[in-house]
Amino acid sequence: MTASPPEPRPGPTPAATGHQNLDPHLDRYAARTKGMTASEIRALFAVASRPEVVSLAGGMPNLAALPLESLSTQMAELISEDGLSALQYGSAHGVPALREQICEVMALEGISAHPDDVVVTVGSQMGLDMVTRLFCDPGDTVIAEGPSYVGALGSFAAYQADVVHVAMDDDGLVPAALAEALSQAEKNGKRVKFLYTIPNFHNPAGVTLAIERRGEILEICRRHDVLVVEDNPYGLLGFDNQTYPALRSTDPDNVVYLGSFSKTFASGLRVGWVLAPHAVREKLVLAAESATLCPPTLNQLVVSRYLSTHDWKGQVKTFCENYRERRDAMLSALEQHMPEGCTWTRPDGGFYVWMTVPEGVDTKAMLPRAVTARVAYASGTGFYADGLGSRQMRLSYCYPTPERIREGVRRLAAVLESEMDL
Ligand code: PMP
């Protein structure tokens, strides 16, 4: 890995710099900052970014296929034709033309939305933060798949929400497990605020929620009066041209949908959005306003122009072809090299494979030895709020070349084998 990851950026953590106890402001921090700890993944990036290390750890989109020349022409045109408004403040709600285009993008997944109900955000990460801010008091409960997206767990922790994980299988979130978790939470007197779910090409699990399960999940949440937060940054990155109907498409009044251009266009522009139920939208705009005043106008106009002048769907197809080639390289290398007892998911899209290793191997403890052997992965524990995941790891195939992926998997298998001999 050579540049910034899409998840929390690398940087020295207090623990890493040894300054933890020297902070003169320690007594001043708000109580909620106790939940703010550097994710394990973040701590890893510094080592994983050394060029000799094959990093299967990060989730950086591979942007090499972007048409940089025509993008630079368009950006220059944008400044010369529309510079004064592009460089000006805008509304917290987002640029109206872009909100209309976002509705067209979501229509590909069966969503029928009004542009007024779309709020543009600084990446979907900001959407996650705002939604948690709007709904969660300290001690409230969020239900999330186990494992779940590390950046979402970070937002939940920052607002002091408790996370209850619900099991997945190869078809995604298990409805019976969800129903059981909700009943249990009710029995324990917990206030469950929402189900946070990544239905398509899950980060980190690599699985997709089966179509037959979607209605049932919505129905269970309705029955328990729990909102659904659908996080869908990978939905258009299916390898077989398949798109799944969004949860939001069937239950607009009970689903908050988070979208992003980070994986379909350019993560560095930081343009995402929230499609909220109509009643929630106003509060969302107020939350956005207090966080950023408005999302960057220039970046929104770049995205808007890109969507209206480029064959952006063709570009997404090209991205998918690249990722598919990398996925194939990873799956065949795993098949070839991994020792007996390892199992892994087989994603049909997105960026990630989730691997379970034999009992007795601790992926977190093994990581330094893997890095010494010049391969990095994300250990499973970072994807759980409750300390589980020590027999799992996330392997990302999105960024390295297929050759590097094969080499990385070969190195990882050797580390695992020696670990199993211990
Ligand atoms: N949700 C999920 C599931 C993700 O994987 C990511 C990025 N890794 C995000 C949200 C945040 O994406 P962004 O802020 O770049 O839109």
Image (cartoon, rainbow, N blue to C red):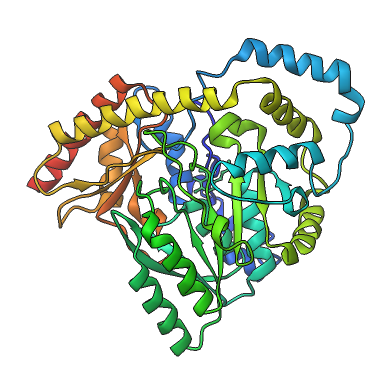
- For ligand 1, the image quadrant comes to top right
Residue at 51 percent of width and 18 percent of height: 65
Q: Is residue 217 left or right of residue 81?
A: left
Percent position (x, y) of residue 360? 15, 57
Seen at 20% across and 35% down, the residue is: 334
- Residue 172 appears in the figure: yes
Q: How many marks?
A: 0
Q: Compare residues 360 and 71 and report the one nearer the observer.
A: 71
- Where is residue 253 drawn, in percent x and y? 64, 66
Report the front residue among 210 and 186.
Answer: 210
In this rendering, the answer to whether 131 lies above or below 420 is below
In this rendering, would 51 be left or right of 14? left
Q: Position of residue 371 (x, y in %)?
A: 31, 35
Is 269 placed above or below 318 here? Answer: below
Residue in the image at 43% along x and 30% along y: 49
Report whether residue 374 is seen: no
Query: Quick check: 77 above or below 44?
Result: above
**Quick one: 149 or 85, which is closer to the camera?**
85
Relative to 223, say whether 50 is above or below: above
Q: Nearer the viewer, residue 192 or 220?
A: 220
State the quadrant of the N terminus. top left
Can you tell which quarter of the image residue 66 is in?
top right
User: Residue placed farthest to the right in the image?
Assistant: 84
Q: Residue 225, image x and y in percent?
A: 56, 78
Picture residue at 15% right of the left edge, 45% below the top:
419
